[in-house]
């Protein structure tokens, strides 16, 4: 096997050699301030396309032409898979239709604020390798939308969901044109086309396969930038453990092979390239020890409004955080390194996001004296009494959700945390040894809330 630990930098340099910025002709006047030589812009077709698309979207919105646009959006967690799938399909929609009588205007939306993007260092590394503009200026993020999604969704041509089975409530008025997901089909938008639900390690696999299938049917293929191809390979690699994890499917392997053959790494071995990409990106993904508790809470945060049968409170706001540290480790990341401060920081974050019910899903490995490690997970439940619900309602809601979690039908044995007797009202922490994560616990909580009266 090749020593790709040293090979990958060389591969990246070789890829970049084809995308060096051209020198500006002597005497050419700089008309756009964004092209100032003092400003470091991304190089290559992918960065140029992404920046130009973002600019045109904002220009058209200002001119009242939002109805001409399709927004491709992933989930609000903003992981590399979601980001790459959205960018890939937006690029494909625009370029596959550019020589037709009905060209499509499409833009990828990262449903995270720009200030939160670097909380996922693997994304930053992948975008840097793809020669995107520093600071992620080429990308459209939630805090850069020119108006709230509830209003914008009514004006758009439509939205495409990737790595996401159904839209957030704030996008519910938008027409759903297509869906690509690798999880459970929830029956959303049955008339969407394409509408693909398939179990794969990466949603990018599903999107890339569809893109390649359609690309190869065109009379003339459009230009596929190597930076995007390499981003696709990285997303598949990190989600599939370099194509070696138990989640890896035949489709992941076949699609990665097809993408590799079009990339600047086409002469290299697929298994070696994917292993190296997984190693480098996974190493970056774990480089988060410097993050404080607030950053950990918002790093992988997903939430939405849930309907209830209660006439007093017809909707409840639910939020989920996923954190790769134990509760004890997180407490040490607060200013006072005390339990009360964990809940103080947590309360400030949930107040900022307007959440009524918060669930934190922690996972870590417990070390034993004999050197073995055991995977442990924790569930933290907290219900606020705030603007939306009063104290009596919060007490009632906490009991309903707590009972649903403890009496789940998934066979998950939740054991009270070792400091559970120190918790305040409407706070609970459990540990468990199952592999259940957000995809298991979220439906349990949502169903409990939807039945709460």
Image: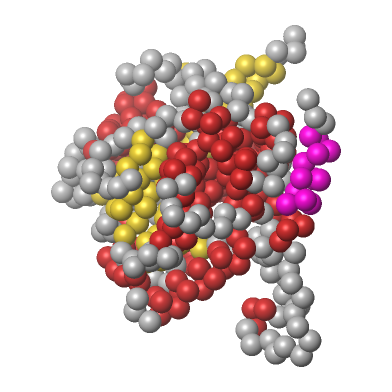
Residue 343 lies left or right of residue 271; in this view the side is left
Please report the bounds of the magenta region as a residue range: 4-15
| Residue drawn at point x = 27 percent, y = 48 percent | 192
Q: Is residue 380 above or below residue 52?
A: above
Q: Quadrant of the N terminus?
A: top right
| Residue drawn at point x = 56 percent, y = 58 percent | 223
Residue 273 place in picture, x, y as percent: 70, 35
Q: Main secondary structure of the magenta part?
A: helix
Residue 10 visible in the displayed image: yes
- Could you say which is closer to the camera, residue 263 or residue 50? 263
Residue 217 place in picture, x, y as percent: 42, 48
- Could you say which is closer to the camera, residue 101 or residue 407? 101
* Residue 38, quarter of the rendered image: bottom right
| Residue drawn at point x = 45 percent, y = 71 percent | 57
Residue 195 lies left or right of residue 2; in this view the side is left
* Residue 262, quarter of the rendered image: top right
Residue 277 place in picture, x, y as percent: 69, 38
């Amino acid at each position: 096997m090749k020593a790709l630990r040293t090979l990958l930098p060389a591969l990246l340099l070789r890829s970049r050699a084809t995308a060096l910025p051209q020198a500006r002709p002597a005497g050419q006047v700089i008309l756009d301030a964004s092209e100032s030589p003092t400003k470091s812009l991304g190089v290559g077709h992918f960065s140029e396309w992404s920046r130009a698309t973002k600019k045109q979207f904002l220009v058209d919105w200002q001119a009242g032409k939002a109805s001409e646009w399709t927004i491709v959006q992933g989930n609000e967690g903003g992981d590399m898979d979601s980001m790459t799938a959205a960018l890939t399909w937006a690029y494909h929609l625009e370029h596959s239709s550019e020589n037709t009588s009905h060209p499509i205007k499409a833009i990828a939306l990262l449903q995270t604020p720009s200030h939160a993007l670097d909380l996922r260092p693997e994304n930053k590394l992948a975008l840097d390798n793809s020669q995107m503009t520093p600071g992620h200026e080429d990308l459209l993020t939630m805090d850069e939308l020119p108006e709230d999604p509830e209003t914008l969704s009514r004006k758009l041509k439509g939205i495409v969901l990737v790595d996401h089975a159904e839209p957030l409530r704030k996008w519910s008025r938008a027409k759903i044109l297509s869906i690509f997901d690798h999880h459970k089909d929830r029956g959303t938008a049955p008339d969407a086309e394409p509408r693909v639900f398939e179990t794969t390690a990466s949603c990018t696999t599903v999107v890339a396969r569809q893109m390649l299938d359609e690309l190869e049917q065109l009379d003339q293929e459009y230009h596929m930038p190597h930076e995007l191809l390499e981003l696709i390979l990285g997303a598949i690699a990190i989600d599939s453990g370099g194509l070696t994890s138990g989640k890896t499917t035949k489709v992941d392997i076949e699609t990665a092979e097809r993408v590799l053959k079009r990339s600047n790494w086409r002469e290299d071995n697929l298994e070696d390239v994917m292993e190296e990409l997984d190693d480098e990106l996974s190493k970056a993904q774990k480089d988060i020890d410097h993050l404080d508790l607030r950053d950990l809470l918002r790093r992988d945060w997903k939430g939405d409004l849930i309907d209830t049968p209660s006439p007093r409170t017809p909707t409840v706001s639910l939020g989920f955080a996923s954190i790769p540290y134990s509760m004890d480790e997180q407490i040490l990341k607060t200013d006072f390194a005390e339990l009360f401060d964990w809940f103080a920081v947590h309360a400030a974050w949930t107040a900022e996001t307007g959440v009524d019910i918060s669930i934190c899903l922690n996972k870590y490995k417990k070390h034993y004296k004999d050197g073995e490690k055991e995977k442990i997970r924790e569930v933290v439940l907290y219900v606020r009494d705030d603007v939306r619900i009063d104290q009596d309602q919060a007490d009632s809601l906490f009991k309903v959700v707590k009972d649903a979690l403890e009496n789940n039908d998934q066979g998950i044995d939740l054991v009270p945390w070792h400091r559970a007797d120190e918790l305040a009202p409407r706070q609970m922490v459990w540990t468990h040894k199952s592999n259940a994560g957000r995809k298991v616990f979220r439906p349990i909580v949502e169903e409990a809330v939807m039945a709460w009266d």
